[in-house]
């Protein structure tokens, strides 16, 4: 065991020596080209980050792009197959289309509901008569810091056939003559169950972000609407919504990216086959399944990037119609 520690320490010392040498060379090269000492020191200090970015981010991204055009399985040398992986993924009958449908439906339903709830709760908490605002901020942000696996275990129990949710709703089920649904194993209720579960984390963190945006709205704007005879709806429509629209835009873009990259629910919840799975889960299954289709997984990852770019581009293009920035003329 001591030898293992010594070997690890030696690896760290070698890495530190290499980084230090790279920084030393960078500084001296810049100084030879006449760069000021302060500027050369600044560029030198970003060398460790730049090396880490190249080794652990840029290289894997470029390698993934290359592997997407090969039949690489992680063991044998990759063989160039061109666009074959993309063609197989996009053909009818592949797992890509059900997974895409599942992912887009999940995001298209959970995001609007989550943002609407977050905005409503943030408006309530922004009232001047609300006490213990720090406590409420913490409570609503708590789901964002709880480990995802722990949250999933909790919701699997809550939404099981004999779980707390069905126990609470059992009088309604009896009234309408309906059996207790199995939220995650019945194809009819699997997607609604996932959406209900997603609201736990989606609107909590967004509530805190939107609350900060609402708190920054000048009180004079509300007073001006009140002087003009406007009520609560006029204040919301003409002041709150326009002024908080940049924050909504920010949370919407992050929400779209997060929805397309949804992973944990599809892995830890045994969803019915008819429901499909999420795109990110499909990437994992291709990459680390029995056949280790790394080429397929890489191609699907780049298709996911394309989907995210298209969706976010649509949001950016439409932002001119609904996002208001103070100081801009309309």
Image: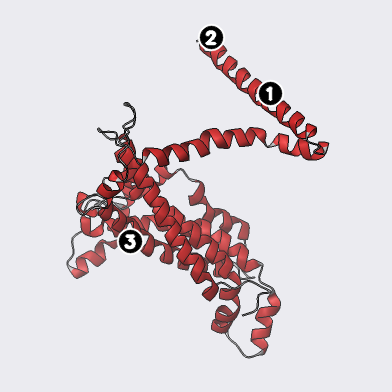
Q: Position of residue 109 (x, y in %)?
A: 36, 64
Q: Quadrant of the C terminus?
A: bottom right
- Local packing at callout 1 (Cα closer than 10 Å; few below 14, some 14-19, many 20+) is few
Residue 122 shown left or right of residue 167 in the figure: right
Residue 262 visible in the shown view: no
For disc 2, the marked residue is 2
Q: Nearer the viewer, residue 31 or 156?
A: 31
Element class at badge 3: helix
Element class at badge 1: helix
Q: Nearer the viewer, mark 2 or mark 3?
A: 3
Q: CA distance from mark 2 to mark 3?
A: 53 Å
Q: Name the mark on residue 21.
A: 1
- Local packing at callout 2 (Cα closer than 10 Å; few below 14, some 14-19, many 20+) is few
Residue under the image location 58 percent in, 34 percent down:
52
Q: Name the mark on residue 105.
A: 3
**Residue 80 vertical placement versus 194 (above, below):** above
Task: Tell me which label, 2 or 3, sits earlier in the chain.
Answer: 2
Q: CA distance from mark 3 to mark 1?
A: 52 Å
Task: Tell me which label, 3 or 1, sits earlier in the chain.
Answer: 1
Residues at marks 2 and 1 touching, judged by CB atoms closer than 8 Å = no
Q: Name the mark on residue 102.
A: none
């Amino acid at each position: 065991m001591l030898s293992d520690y010594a070997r690890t320490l030696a690896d760290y010392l070698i890495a530190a020596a290499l980084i230090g040498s790279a920084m030393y060379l960078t500084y001296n090269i810049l100084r030879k080209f006449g760069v000021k000492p302060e500027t050369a020191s600044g560029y030198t200090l970003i060398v460790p980050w730049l090396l880490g970015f190249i080794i652990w981010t840029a290289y894997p991204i470029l390698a993934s792009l290359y592997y997407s055009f090969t039949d690489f399985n992680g063991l044998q040398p990759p063989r160039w197959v061109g666009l074959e992986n993309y063609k197989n993924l996009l053909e009818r009958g592949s797992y890509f289309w059900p997974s895409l449908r599942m992912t887009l439906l999940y995001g298209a339903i959970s995001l609007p509901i989550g943002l609407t709830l977050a905005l409503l709760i943030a408006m309530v908490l922004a009232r001047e008569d609300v006490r213990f605002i720090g406590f409420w901020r913490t409570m609503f942000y708590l789901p964002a810091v709880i480990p995802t696996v722990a949250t999933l275990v909790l919701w699997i129990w809550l939404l099981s056939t004999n779980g707390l949710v069905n126990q609470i709703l059992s009088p309604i089920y009896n009234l309408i003559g309906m059996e207790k649904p199995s939220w995650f194993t019945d194809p009819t209720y699997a997607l609604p169950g996932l959406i209900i579960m997603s609201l736990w984390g989606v609107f909590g963190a967004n509530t805190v972000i939107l609350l900060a945006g609402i708190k920054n709205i000048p009180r004079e704007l509300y007073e001006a609407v009140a002087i003009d005879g406007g009520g609560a709806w006029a204040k919301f429509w003409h002041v709150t919504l326009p002024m908080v629209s940049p924050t909504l835009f920010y949370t919407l873009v992050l929400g779209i990216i997060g929805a397309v990259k949804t992973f944990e629910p599809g892995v830890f919840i045994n969803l019915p086959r008819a429901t499909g799975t999420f795109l990110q889960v499909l990437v994992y299954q291709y990459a680390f399944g029995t056949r280790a289709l790394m080429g397929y997984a890489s191609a699907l990852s780049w298709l996911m990037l394309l989907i995210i770019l298209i969706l976010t581009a649509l949001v950016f293009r439409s932002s001119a119609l609904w996002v208001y920035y103070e100081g801009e003329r309309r």
